[in-house]
Amino acid sequence: MNRRDAIGRVALIMGGTLIGAEFLLSGCKPKAATLENLFDDDHVAFLNEVADTILPTTKTPGAKAAKVGDFIAVMVRDCYETADQDIFLKGLGQIDEASNKKFSKKFLDLDASQRTAVLTDLDKEQQTYSKTKKPKDPNHYFRMIKELTLLGYFTSEIGCKQALRYVEVPGHYDGNLPYKKGDKAWALS
């Protein structure tokens, strides 16, 4: 069994696939110079608002504070294949279309509960799509957004140090560490 097969099987065992797995296997590939301006400031601001709706500020800062929109823009520009980039960019427009259909307003003009309702509908749509998706079918844009939001947030300084329990240099292994309901997960560097 080669490394690629092993990673694919682990992904299936864990109950899903990571859309960005290609960059984990082959690294980020430089793209043509024309992609430098793939995302403008308005796109990044929009991505920050979508990400902040997925991971809002609670006891810890939300995705916008972690600048997840910038992270998503870099990942899509530098690590995604052209087909996935196209799907992703078209998907940003589809969020506004879904918002207009449901509330007759653009996504950025909605209040927090309306934004959540729109994204919840899109999440249900992508879950249904993922259940029937064949290997050759294109990825769903909202799944990409959601995965990149989680990856960007929990690998940011805010996500690691404030949302998770952070240990800069971990000590010995303790397989019987006491756990209390509500404890944060660990982030190790």
Image (tube, rainbow, N blue to C red):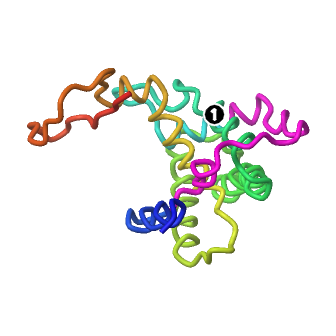
- Residue 80, given in percent of the width and then of the height, sits at 71, 49
- Left or right: 2 with respect to 160? right
- Residue placed most toward the observer, 16 or 122: 16
- Left or right: 170 with respect to 140? left
Q: Which residue is most to the right?
A: 34
Name which residue lies at 80% across and 53% down: 82
- Residue 136, given in percent of the width and then of the height, sits at 68, 74
Q: Secondary structure at mark 1?
A: helix
Relative to 112, residue 58 above or below: above
For the C terminus, the quadrant is: top left
The magenta segment: 17-46
Relative to 136, residue 178 above or below: above
Name which residue lies at 36% across and 24% down: 162
Q: Residues within 10 Å of mark 1 (few under 14, many from 20)?
A: many
- Residue placed most toward the observer, 133 or 55: 133
- Left or right: 45 with respect to 65? right
Amino acid type at mark 1: Gly
Q: Which residue is most to the front?
A: 1
**Residue beneath label 1, please?**
69
- Residue placed most toward the observer, 85 or 103: 85
Q: Quadrant of residue 130?
A: bottom right
**Is residue 152 on the magenta stretch?**
no
- Residue 33, given in percent of the width and then of the height, sits at 89, 36
